[in-house]
Image: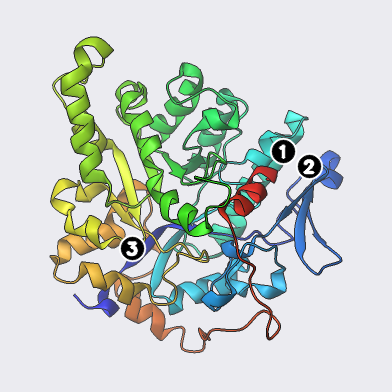
Amino acid sequence: MQAEDLVLVSVDDHVVEPPDLFEGRVPARYRDRAPKVVRKEDGTDVWSYEGSEIPNIGLNAVAGRSPEEYGIEPTSFEEMRAGCYDIHERVRDMNVNGVLGSMCFPSFPQFCGQLFARTEDKEQALAMLQAYNDWHVEGWCGAYPGRFIPLALPPLWDPELMGAEVRRMAAKGCHAVTFSENPSKLGYPSLHSEHWDPFWSACSDEGTVVCLHIGSSSQLVITAPDAPIDVLITLQPMNIVQAAADLVWSPVLRKYPDLKIALSEGGIGWIPYFLERIDYVYQHHKAWTGQSFGDQLPSQVFLDRIVTCFIDDSFGVESRAHLNLDQVCWECDYPHSDSTWPNAPEAAMKYLAGLPDADVNRITHENAMRIFSYDPFASRARDRCTAGALRAEAGDVDVSIAARRAPGEQTKHTHATDLGSLSSKR
């Protein structure tokens, strides 16, 4: 298979929400309380809600920028590539990147709607969250049928409401919901608690995949106050191993045998040793810890039930004999700094070359289609879905690197605590 033959479906991209998101979607009594974009005196744009300002952090929207310009400074919409927030330009950027389908995680509400969960008036909070979800399904994904996998935010503060929202969104064709990799870090019960059972039950019933994105605990991997940000960026994906361990040893997977959970942007290269370790722990310690997986090993439960996702992981692909290739999905991460845009097909072929076509297809799109109840071929003939065919429709899309800063302006030297400080304010 050649790069132009790939059919690429990314299960991890991101949307920078447009300023008109809430227009016409919020009940009249809450209209004046809805989040809104405010232009600050320094020229940056922030979302304003309930007395808080949430900036668009530059590192989250660097597609089309020179790596020398990457940074965590707040930015404006004018400084971003339009595909970050404009649905029509997003599809054009997908086409020029040879990407057929995309699942987009939120930005300013945070990965699992923490912003709305902090709202004191919970009726207002639910109204805002549902307005966001309706915009995402109808306004963002609905603008281009067959091109997006819808993803819902949950009302974290009430598991019964979470279950109801999962069911409401499933009726709209949305079978994915974003949740925290470690809710205890957000001040909620852990994955080991029965507190979340109404949520798990609804997801299991509706075939809704629970996506745990790295960073969704609002906690960053900061080893020391003066550690360079390179340390954080290196460790952040591998930190998902903590969520993996929580899931395996919690009752969730055994209590809900039909539930699917995805470790979003967590990579796959770490998994073989993790599987070896959990089996060793089980066999050596189950007599006194009381764990029981019946006639299975914990590694089998993980492989059968956990969806693993990666952007660029050649070692993980080389270790595929230790994985369940029916549970592995590909990611692009547009428009974040780890993204392979606009060269995703070429980047993917560096580790997919030489694999049987059947394995390539599973990783690049078939698994995502099955797991997330997504059928792009219902809207578009398959021969028009390949990277080559999509790029042929995007001949006028400019992918050249564009300078956004004034000549001579430099990104400041950044430590991990700088980003941690911004995260804690959000």
Distance between the alpha carbons at the discs numbered 1 and 2:
7 Å
Q: Residue at x 61, y 74 (%)?
A: 81
**In this rendering, would 401 be left or right of 119?**
left
- Image depth: mark 3 or mark 1 in front: 3
- Image depth: mark 2 or mark 3 in front: 3
Q: Are marks 2 and 3 in contact (CB under 8 Å)?
A: no
Q: Nearer the viewer, residue 380 or 284?
A: 284
- Looking at the rendered structure, the secondary structure element under dot 1 is helix
* Disc sitting over residue 312 in the figure: 3
* 144 shown above or below 257: below
* Disc sitting over residue 368 in the figure: none
Residue at the spot of label 1: 127
- Looking at the rendered structure, the secondary structure element under dot 2 is loop
- Looking at the rendered structure, the secondary structure element under dot 3 is loop
Colour theme:
rainbow
Q: Nearer the viewer, residue 149 or 193?
A: 193
> Horizontal and vertical percent for residue 248?
31, 29
> Horizontal and vertical percent for residue 422?
66, 50
Query: Of the residues shown, which amino acid type is indicated by label 1?
Result: Ala
**In this rendering, would 315 be left or right of 222?**
left
Tell which circle, 1 or 2, labels the residue nearer the N-terminal end.
Answer: 2
Distance between the alpha carbons at the discs numbered 3 and 1:
38 Å
Residue 62 visible to the viewer: yes
Q: Residue at x 55, y 41 (%)?
A: 219
Residue at the spot of label 2: 27
